Structures are given as structure tokens and as C-alpha cells.
Amino acid sequence: MRIRSVAVQLVIFSIISFSLLSIFAEEQQFDIDGKVIDLDDSNFDSAISTFDYVFVDFYAPWCGHCKRLSPELDAAAAALAGLEKPIVIAKIDADKYRRVGDKYEIDGFPTLKLFMHGVPVDYNGPRKADLLVRFLKKFVAPDVSILDSDTAISNFVEEAGSHFPIYVGFGMDESVISKFAIKYKKQAWFSVAKDFSDSVMESYDFDKVPALVSLHPAYDEKNIFYGPFDDQFMEEFIKQNVLPLCLPINSDALKLLRDEDRKIVLTFVEDENDDKTKQLVKLLKAAASANRDYLFAYAGLQQFPDFVETFEISKKTKFPKMVVWDGNEEYFNVIDSESIGDDDQGSAITHFLEGYKEGRTISKKISGPSFMQFLNSMIGLKLVFLIVFLVAVMMIIQTLGKEDEDNASAQPLRPDSSEAQRSGDKED
């Protein structure tokens, strides 16, 4: 029983110690002074709970990228602290404080996350101070900005930058769009323009109101929605325009596809940057505009070989090549459309889409783990380790209990005094 008692005491002591540490951590005060806060495992949770918005740099002191990022964060900290809804910048050595790093699945440095009311969101935006400030302002901006002049519209679009799509509702009431502005706040800017001139209508290419205009400055794209303005059709338009007509695939772009439920018409090229590819992308955008039920994307073998090669693509492949991908592990080749060639590519794209819709396809599996599986692999590994740890703890507890029972059964019963006396009498 002594072993079990010691084990119970250790558990109780650990719980009390953890509780005391939590209390002391919560008592720590933090100030918004425009400086980067240096955190450790004793005050990290307290800092996250103290501020509504905390931008955290999970770094390692030996990391060269982290060292180059540090002065940019120092410069951005003052500007972000001065916002009406301030954003605090903090950093933690996640290589040293592994408990915190493991909790938030940090497997590379630097890793940046924005904590909004305690909930972390991965940051994949720019890292120069001025662009970083502009990017993060999105998360503390009003759900829907009200624009009452041509100048206000121009300033809003300029301040929004090019990293998020922009939706401007011309002649629309804020209440019509507010629900979707809240739902897609992390993915886009939303506004309504109450007053504007004919020149604005000409500039944004709409000829009547109400009209919802979507802009993708980074891709020079613009789309107009004239209704109907009920929930189903509005959300369909908003969701389809969160991503550009033809998305260039890289690791960050693949993360955006987690919530995408459309099939992906994926075109492989040898080099994304050559002139032939740029001309092809224009044709793909035209096809995408006429087939909004699909997401169009392209990837270059030179730029992203680890991804492209999982589709059995190599330097021997005849480019460009098209497939339809489910975003996970299945994709489809279209019979008689192995490649779209260099001549009359527009007709070749149309022929490919017709073949897919008619079912003239061959289903295949990608040759490695899907990117979604890769993104979740660390989560899976950590879950396995957690299960193994819990099983080990249970086995230890059972072992201790069994030892107690064995010790108890092995110990001879203490004879009472009369039996001891009789035993002594016999020996005499």
C-alpha cells in the first residue's frame, strides 16, 4: 500500500503545483507599450488570455530567418499597438520551450500565428513591417466598412492591399451583407458604398445598382453580381470569388483548399514563369469564368516538384497536362486528352472539360500522401504519441496496484498472542 500512497501523493502534489503556477501566471501584468513582448512557458497562456489580439512569433535563436524577421516585428509593434483595437506582438523561443511549441504544433521556424480571443490562426502573409501591419489590420477592421464618397472607396481599396479579395456592395444595405462579412472575415474585406459617382460605376465596370463587386488586386480580377440577393446565391458568389479564377499552386495555396468543396481542374506546366504559361493561364481563366462549379489551378514542375510528381508527372511528361483533382488523393485523367498541346489550346481545354463531364475518365490515386494528409500528419503523430503516453501511464498504475496486492498476499498474517504462546509451548 505504501507505493500506491506515494503515487497518490505525487499526483496530488503535481495538481497543486500546477494550480499555483497557473494562479501566479494569471497575476502577471502586461502593458501595451509598442514593444515586442518576450514570453516563456510560464506566462504564455496568461498573455494570450490578457489581450484580444496577439501576434506570436514562434522562433529559434539559431534560425537565420528568425533573426531577419526580428527587426521587422520591432518596427511593426508600435504601429499595431496604436490601433483602435490594438494588436500585441509577442515572441517565444519554441525550441527551448517545447511544451508550448508542441501544443501549437510548431515544426518550423519562424512560425507566425495570430491569436484572436485566444483562438490561433496561421499567418501566411508578408513579413516586411509595413505590409505586415496592413495585412493584420484586416482582422481588427469593422466587419463591413461604410463608404460614403468616391474618395472613401478609393482609400478603402488602397488600404485593403492585395492579399485578400475585396467585396464592395454598391447601393446595398449593410444588413444584406453583414452575415457573410462575419463568416468570411478571415478571408476577405467587405464594404458597402452609399454614395458614389458615375465615374466610379465606369471604373468598376457595373451599370446598375444594387451590385456586388469582387476584386482580386493581386490577380487583376473583377467580377460583378447583380443578384438575386438572397442568402444562397450571395454566398455562392462570395465563396466562388474568395479564390482567384485560376489559382497558382504552392504550399500556402494548398492550405486554402482545405475548405474548398469544388473539384479542381488542375493544369501542370513545366515552368510557371515562361510566356507560354502566361498565355495559357488567360485561356484557363476564361474557361473558369464559364465553369464556376469548378476551381481552376495550375502548378509548375520547376516550382513545386514535390507536389507535381505525386500525379505521375515528370520531365518526360508532355506539357501542358490537365487532370481533375478532388483535393485529396483521387484524380481523373480524361481519355484522349492526355495533354492539351500548343495549338488551339482553347479548344483543347473545352474538349477536356466535355470529356470529364461525359464521364470519359480514368480514376487514379496520387502516388504519395495527399497534401491534406501531409498537413494533418503532425496532428496524427501527436495524437498517437498522446495515446501511447496514456496507455503507458495506465500500465504503470496497474503495475503499482498489482505490486501492492502481491506484497499484501505475500506478507504472513500476524499471529495473535494465544497462538504464539501455544507455538512456544510446543517448542519447549
Image (cartoon, rainbow, N blue to C red):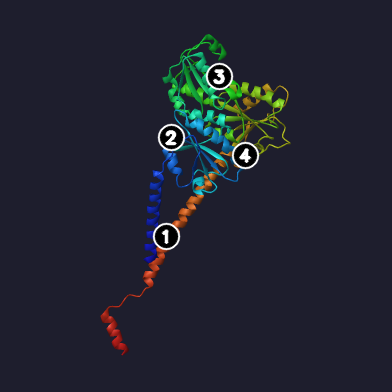
Of marks 2 and 4, the one in the foreground: 2
Q: Which residue is mark 1?
A: 397
Given residues 242 and 80, the one toward you in this image is 80
User: Looking at the image, is mark 1 or mark 4 earlier in the sequence?
Assistant: 4
Is residue 31 among the parts visible in the rendering?
A: yes
Q: Residue at x 38, y 47 (%)?
A: 23
Residue 365 horizontal/vertical position (percent): 61, 39
User: Looking at the image, is mark 2 or mark 1 earlier in the sequence?
Assistant: 2
User: Looking at the image, is mark 2 or mark 4 earlier in the sequence?
Assistant: 2
User: Looking at the image, is mark 4 or mark 3 earlier in the sequence?
Assistant: 3
Q: Which residue is mark 3?
A: 223
Give the quadrant of the C terminus. bottom left
Q: Which residue is mark 4?
A: 366
Q: CA distance from mark 1 to mark 3?
A: 63 Å
Q: Secondary structure at mark 3?
A: strand
Q: Residue at x 60, y 25 (%)?
A: 218
- Kindly identify which numbered label has been placed on residue 52: 2
Q: Amino acid at mark 4?
A: Ile
